[in-house]
Image: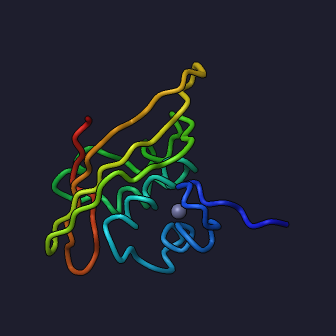
């Protein structure tokens, strides 16, 4: 059987890309890696606990793992457009393509902010472009 391709469309197999992050056998070394794994969590659905764990507590108020586990959009692919890191802060600009519940294609363009807290990268918030 060919290996399952990673939903983050890195071209790598899931088990050599976001899989070890989502199953907690490793943690993201960079904000970009975390970004990819969070995209995969959304694409796969059912990983709300991971999304919540990697969300900065200052901005995750009101979110539940249950709600974050729901697959509302059918994610098709991820393109990282820009990546900047300064010390414990980073931004990742990306485009995610999706198909919505009615079968209409769309593009999600966001600049996400990340912060490293106790050696762990966390998602802070995102600005839609
Ligand atoms: Zn991946």
Considering only vertical position in the picture, is 98 above or below 48? above
Residue 51 lies in quadrant: bottom left
Q: Is residue 39 left or right of residue 99?
A: left
Q: Is residue 42 left or right of residue 30?
A: right
Q: Is residue 29 left or right of residue 111?
A: right
Residue 89 lies in quadrant: bottom left
- List x then y, in percent, for residue 12: 61, 67
Residue 56 lies in quadrant: bottom left
Q: Is residue 73 left or right of residue 34?
A: right
- List x then y, in percent, for residue 83: 28, 60
Q: Nearer the viewer, residue 108 or 51?
A: 108
- List x then y, in percent, for residue 95: 40, 43
* Residue drawn at x 26%, y 44% as measured from the top left: 62
Which quarter shows the N terminus? Answer: bottom right
* Residue drawn at x 34%, y 38% as measured from the top left: 109
Considering only vertical position in the picture, is 85 above or below 127? below
Which quarter shows the C terminus? Answer: top left
Considering only vertical position in the picture, is 20 above or below 98? below
* Residue drawn at x 51%, y 55% as measured from the top left: 40
Considering only vertical position in the picture, is 58 above or below 122? above
Q: Nearer the viewer, residue 62 or 85?
A: 85
Furthest residue in direction right, as rendered: 1
């Amino acid at each position: 059987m060919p290996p399952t391709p990673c939903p983050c469309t890195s071209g790598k197999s899931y088990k050599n890309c976001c899989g070890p992050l989502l199953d907690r056998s490793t943690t993201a070394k960079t904000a970009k890696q975390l970004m990819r794994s969070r995209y995969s969590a959304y694409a796969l659905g059912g990983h709300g606990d991971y999304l919540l764990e990697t969300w900065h507590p200052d901005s995750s108020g009101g979110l539940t793992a249950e709600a974050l586990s729901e697959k509302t959009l059918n994610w098709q692919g991820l393109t990282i457009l820009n990546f900047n890191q300064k010390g414990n802060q980073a931004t990742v600009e990306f485009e995610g393509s999706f198909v919505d519940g009615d079968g209409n294609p769309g593009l999600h363009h966001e600049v996400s902010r990340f912060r490293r807290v106790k050696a762990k990268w966390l998602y802070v918030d995102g600005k839609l472009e």
